[in-house]
């Protein structure tokens, strides 16, 4: 379904003068492990677009849920390693073969991460509660029959159930528990997943959101959304007694406008987020 792809990325070094290029090679592959494609590239592009903020964020613990080939967690570690050398990385995947491929990808590029074969973060909730500063997730988001969700092998990498939301809706409350008070979540979504409703769902938990990257490919319209806790929204959520699941008109109009026009929604100039 996916062909082997070789890829690279580049970014400015800490002195803003030297250009450092990292070649991210797939040194190992397996027919049951998802290889990097448009969604993986868009997620790394979003991290690169937000790199200055990530460096200022100075994360202690970064986590990827569903590491697949290891492309994203390796790229993130390489982005941060010089300026944030103390950061610890954790990556999980329900597919044990993906864990092994990720291990080889990390080793090939001289970076380290703690790799755990588990479903989302099962068994890690108590250990990581409130500690994750950066979480990156490229979830199974493709609409499929519900009985395909969680199957063994590569199907677990894309089978998302009805509207592609079955796994996403499991991840969001876990992310809320694991993220630190200043934690950030970067999530890949598809138009079919209803990104505006996902943003509303997270808003009810006290999170602000912005779309860092939007990309239209031959097969899909992707949205990489960044979430972070917002004090004003948290206060609003406490003071408001919800009577239904309808978003405030202004909020919903804004989100729908951004999603359906496929325009960039980048607000990095007006906040450190």
Image (tube, rainbow, N blue to C red):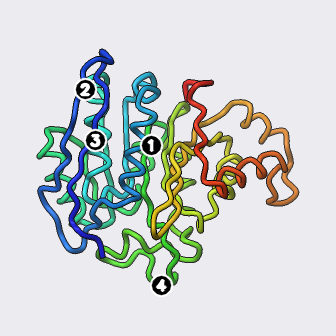
- Tell me the distance, in whole angstroms, between the alpha carbons under discs 2 and 4: 47 Å
- Tell me the distance, in whole angstroms, between the alpha carbons under discs 3 and 1: 12 Å
Q: Quadrant of the N terminus?
A: bottom left
Front tag of 3 and 4: 3
Give the image location of residue 197, x and y in percent. 68, 58
Relative to 16, 216 lies left or right: right
Mark 4, residue position: 147
Give the image location of residue 168, x and y in percent. 53, 62
Give the image location of residue 179, x and y in percent. 50, 40
Label 2 or label 1, whichever comes before in sequence order: 2
Mark 1, residue position: 46
Front tag of 2 and 1: 2
- Tell me the distance, in whole angstroms, between the alpha carbons under discs 2 and 3: 11 Å
Instruction: Please name the residue shown 18% across and 59% down the image.
Output: 101
- Tell me the distance, in whole angstroms, between the alpha carbons under discs 3 and 4: 37 Å
Instruction: Please name the residue shown 27% across and 63% down the image.
Output: 35
Please tell me the numbered disc located at residue 19. Answer: 2
Mark 3, residue position: 9
């Amino acid at each position: 379904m996916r062909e082997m792809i070789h890829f690279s990325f580049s970014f400015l070094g800490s002195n803003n003068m030297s250009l450092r290029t990292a070649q991210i090679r797939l040194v190992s592959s397996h027919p049951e492990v998802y290889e990097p494609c448009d969604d993986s590239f868009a997620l790394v592009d979003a991290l690169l677009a937000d790199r200055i903020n990530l460096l200022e964020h100075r994360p202690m613990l970064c986590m990827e849920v569903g590491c697949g080939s290891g492309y994203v967690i390796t790229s993130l570690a390489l982005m941060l390693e010089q300026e944030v050398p103390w950061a610890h990385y954790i990556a999980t995947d329900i597919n044990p073969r993906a864990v092994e491929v990720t291990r080889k990808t990390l080793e090939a590029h001289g970076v380290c991460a703690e790799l755990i074969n588990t479903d989302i973060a099962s068994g890690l909730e108590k250990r990581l509660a409130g500690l994750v500063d950066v979480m990156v997730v490229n979830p199974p988001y493709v609409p499929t029959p519900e009985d395909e969700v969680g199957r063994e092998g590569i199907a677990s990498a894309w089978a998302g159930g009805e509207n592609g939301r079955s796994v996403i809706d499991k991840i969001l409350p876990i992310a809320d528990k694991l993220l630190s008070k200043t934690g950030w979540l970067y999530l890949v979504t598809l138009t079919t997943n209803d990104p505006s409703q996902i943003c509303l769902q997270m808003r009810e938990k006290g999170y602000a959101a912005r779309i860092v990257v939007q990309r239209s490919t031959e097969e899909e319209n992707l949205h990489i959304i960044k979430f972070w806790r917002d004090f004003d929204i948290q206060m609003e959520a406490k003071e408001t007694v919800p009577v239904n699941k309808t978003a405030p008109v202004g909020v919903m109009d804004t989100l729908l406008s951004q999603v359906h026009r496929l325009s960039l929604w980048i607000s990095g100039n007006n906040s450190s987020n």
